[in-house]
Image: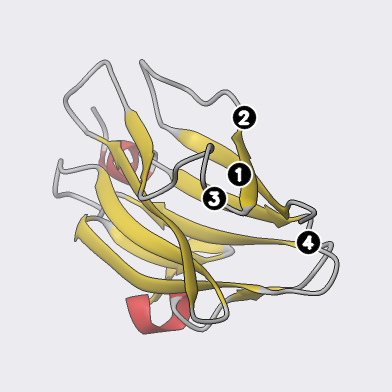
Amino acid sequence: MSETDDIAQIANIRVHNRMRNNSISFENAKLEWGKFYLGDESHEIPASDIDKIVVSPGSMEIAQSCGRKSTSTGVEGTMDLYDGKTKICSLYWESPYFSTSNSFKTTGYDPVSSPYAMTVEPWNHGPGALGDVNITIALMAT
C-alpha cells in the first residue's frame, strides 16, 4: 500500500436535518485513530471544530475524517448528535487500514420510544474505505 492509502481510509459522516425548527449539533467528537479534516485531507482540524458544527433545519453538514499519512491505522471515531440539550444518539465509525470490513453504528437511540425518526442509508461495509455515511433525522409529530 502506498503512503496515500492511509488517508484513503475516509469516513464522512453526513447528517441531514429534516426538522422544521430545530438544529442538530455535533458534540463530543473524538478519534481514536486518524484525523478530522475540512474539505481537503491535508487541511486537518481539531475535534473542537467538529463540536462547533450545527446542522440547521432543512440542511446537511459533514464531519470528515480519514487516516493519517504513513501510520497504517485508518480511522476510528465517535460523536454525539444533540437537539438543543436533548441527546439524539451517539455515532461510532471505523475504517481500519488492514481490514476488509468497516463498522458504523448508532447507540442510545430507540426507534420505539424516541421522538426522532432516524434513517441511516446503506454504507460501504468493505473492502475499501467506509466513505459517506448518510444519516437523516426528523422530529416526529406528537
Inspect the image, locate mark 3, and give the three-letter code of the amino acid beneath it: Ser
Residue at the spot x=18%, y=49% of the render?
A: 70
Which one is in front in this view, the residue at disc 4 or the one at disc 1?
4
Inspect the image, locate mark 1, and give the three-letter code of the amino acid beneath it: Ile
Residue at the spot x=50%, y=61% of the render?
A: 63
Which residue corresponds to mark 3?
114
- Disc 4 from disc 1: Cα separation: 13 Å
Which one is in front in this view, the residue at disc 3 or the one at disc 1?
3
Look at the numbered disc 3 and give the secondary structure of its residue.
Answer: loop
User: Which comes before the other along the chain, label 4 or label 1?
Assistant: 4
Look at the numbered disc 2 and give the secondary structure of its residue.
Answer: loop
Inspect the image, locate mark 4, and give the three-letter code of the amino acid beneath it: Met
- Disc 2 from disc 1: Cα separation: 6 Å
Inspect the image, locate mark 2, and give the three-letter code of the amino acid beneath it: Glu
Q: Which mark is residue 19?
A: 4
Residue at the spot x=37%, y=17% of the render?
A: 126
Mark 1 and mark 2 in contact (Cβ < 8 Å)? Answer: yes
> Is residue 141 depicted above or below 107 in this figure?
below
